[in-house]
Amino acid sequence: MSIHRAVGMSLMVIALVSLSGIGSHLLAGRMISVETTAWFVEGGVIGMFVGNWAVQRLSGPALQQVFAVAIVAVAIFVIFRTA
């Protein structure tokens, strides 16, 4: 599988897991603030355009490196956020 397809599949899985989390949160009777939702939607739309721009301009190996750095950055953020 090409890295371009792998990145797309990874992002699709993230979107599906996110939707599942939102659904279970709402089914549990908890609300999600409109402000929080707006921030996530805004970030998602901006990320979609930036990602599309990057995929069209980066070669497979370069995209693989950018994706790996992004995954490590998110992992570090989560580790420090939960510590």
Image: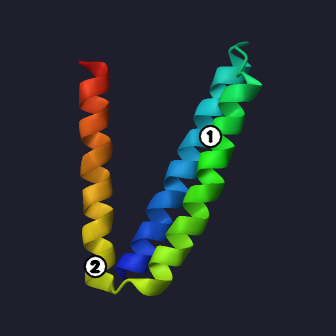
Marks 2 and 1, the one that precedes in the sequence? 1
> Residue tagged by mark 2?
62
> Residue at 35% of width from left, 77% of height from top?
3
The kind of residue tagged 2 is: Ala
Q: Is residue 39 left or right of residue 77?
A: right
Mark 1 is on which residue type? Phe
Q: Is residue 23 above or below residue 63?
A: above
SS label for mark 2: helix
Give how far across and how far down residue 28 sits, in percent: 68, 15
Give how far apart the Cα atoms at labels 2 and 1 are.
Answer: 27 Å
Residue 29 appears in which quarter of the rendering? top right
Q: Secondary structure at mark 1?
A: helix
Q: Quadrant of the C terminus?
A: top left
Provide the residue designation for mark 1.
40
Q: Nearer the viewer, residue 2 or 38?
A: 38
Mark 2 and mark 1 residues within 8 Å of each other at the beta carbon: no
- At 30% from the left and 20% from the top, the residue drawn is 82
